[in-house]
Amino acid sequence: MHRNVKSAPDLPNLARPAHPPLGDFTTDARVLVLIGMAIVVGSGGAAAAWVLLKLIALVTNIVWLGRLSVASASPADTAPGLWMVAVPALGGLVIGLMARFGSEKIRGHGIPEAIEAILIGGSRMQLKVALLKPLSSAISIGTGGPFGAEGPIIMTGGAIGSLFAQCFHLTAAERKTLLVSGAVAGMTAIFGTPIAAVLLAVELLLFEWKPRSFIPVVTAVVVAALWRPALLGSGPLFPFKTTLDLPWWGLGAAVGVGILAGLQSGLMTRLLYAAEDLFERLPVHWMWWPMLGGMIVGLGGLVEPRALGVGYDLIGDLLTGHMAVSEASRLLLVKSIIWLLALASGTSGGVLAPLLILGGTAGWLEGQLLPGDASCWALIGMAAMMGGTMRVPLTGVLFAIELTGNLGLLLPLLTATGSAYAVTVLLLKRSILTEKIARRGRHILREYSVDPFEALRAEDVMVRNVDTLPAAMPIDDAVAFFMADAHRHKAYPVIDADGGLAGMVTRADVLRWRTEGAHDRQTLGEMISDAAVTVGHPDEVLGRIADLMVANEVGRVPIVERGSRRVVGLVARKDLLHIRSIANGAERDRKAYLARQGV
């Protein structure tokens, strides 16, 4: 019986997986559903940001000022004393207990945990993480922890998006989109930086560039931005309109600030994980580490009380110039030490605000020797430190602009941030965020490129001179053909008298026929199975050919002309693997074509 060879429209789903029509993008009307969901998630992320900031203020007021209030307050408003050492330590103890008996996922920066959930956990987060992360972060920051609120809100907003997505029948990619939508919606609500939040999603969290994810993320960010005036106020968080009148060599100074920020970033990253290694060697359970880190924070507060807490007021002072050189130097040293050791202890807090303060302070000090207002160099240092350390250069530039409303510094911001980014990617294989994930045995590649399987077609790689067997070949001859040479292919197309594809014969078929004995001159055309043959067409992209191989568990796919059964080529697994070699060669092989031609 002849095997039934079906054309593309007639093949069952198993033989030919469903694909959208070819085009620039793969997005379909399903994105409209995600847009509707992103509206809900964006609102949830904004609400979570408001709750987190109020919780931080509440804890700060209770433990430092002894009052029940959600008004803005700072640990620096308290006179230095033993209480300044005790409060961060007690806060660390509470967080250690919450982590051990609640969820260990509340420990750390927040952003690495969100990345890990996206890449490894199918974008599924637990309800208790959504509840415990903001509470633990509020306790950590409110009791003096030198952290920012952005890491916790990214984790919390992401958990809201993930939990909402888990209520519906969605793919892992769709859950990821909603997780990231909630995360960046929270960031937008806190800082009022919608464009930077979208760029953060693209550069750090989505691990793709597709309209399917980009459009819902933009929707969630816009919704959060609409909620922000009612919840937290409108306008830039740190209005700053000072311009920088640079001489002809001024951008060279911006490059220098960026290089120093990159070196500072690399030092901070190495010291952080060296400190984590020290904590790992302590002869006590990790539950006690945040308390030890809190004691160090308190001791640092005795030296420089303003180093405690989020420190948004410090950013304001750097941008207005209300700071002395001695104070800035002391702040840079103390904030660096207590932030690194507290974060290494496994407490709950973010990295963005401390990076802004450390980069801004260094930039302000450098600005004392550079042309123009030192406050401008402080802002440039902030962006460079953020972009280099977190490996999000575009986010760093737009974050600084939206945070201050100052578009006039765009070029020096871009110059410095690009320089810092170049330094960190050359010095360190991983960022401060991904190093933690790598230490858990995971590898993350942060570079995106077009999949060559979606750029090449079957006709670009197929073997054109295909070895075939005639349908009229007797079975015993086919057995002898396969057994005569150990280097035979594992499968051959079978061609009928008209030159059309009749089916495929495999080594497994031959082994079965061999055990059955003589076949009374039966031919291949009479014996091959009548199941549908997996076929491709010359104009199909290789990604679809690879999908066919996976779906039907075959290693060779005959390529036939559309509208006929004539075999024009064959694609095997080794041909697909060769594509990776071609792609690597495009990155590795260097040739000077004009020089070779004598031009």
Image: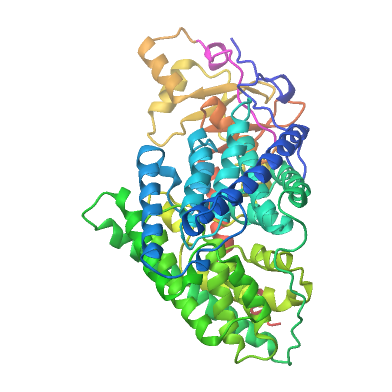
User: Is residue 80 shown left or right of residue 188?
Assistant: left
Q: Is residue 524 magenta?
A: yes
Out of 187 and 516, give the one closest to the viewer.
Answer: 187
Residue furthest to the top in view is: 520
Which residue sits at x=45%, y=45%?
Answer: 106
- Up the image or down, 173 lies above or below 202; here it is above
Q: Position of residue 325 (x, y in %)?
A: 54, 86
User: Quarter of the image containing the N terminus?
Assistant: top right
Q: Residue at x 52, y 52 (%)?
A: 111
Instruction: Examine the rendered structure and indicate whether residue 251 appears above or below residue 30.
Output: below
User: Residue 98: which quarter of the image?
Assistant: top left
* Majority secondary structure in the magenta region: loop
| Residue 87 belongs to magenta span | no
Examine the rendering and report whether any part of residue 374 can be seen. yes
489 or 310: nearer the viewer: 310
What is the image's colouring?
rainbow
Residue occupying image coordinates x 55% and y 56%: 446
Q: Quadrant of the C terminus?
A: bottom right
Percent x, y for residue 307?
Answer: 49, 70
Q: Position of residue 211 (x, y in %)?
A: 73, 45
In the image, which residues are magenta? 522-537
Q: Residue furthest front?
A: 67
Which residue is drawn at the image coordinates 36% and 57% (left, top)? 89
Q: Horizontally, is 155 left or right of 227 in the view? A: left
Q: Can you give x and y, in whole percent of width and height, for residue 53 in the image?
A: 60, 52
Compare residues 169 and 581 and report the one nearer the observer: 169
Which is nearer the eye, 113 or 238?
238
Image vertical order of residue 470 relative to residue 409, above or below: above
Give the answer, above or below, for where 294 lies relative to 594. Answer: above
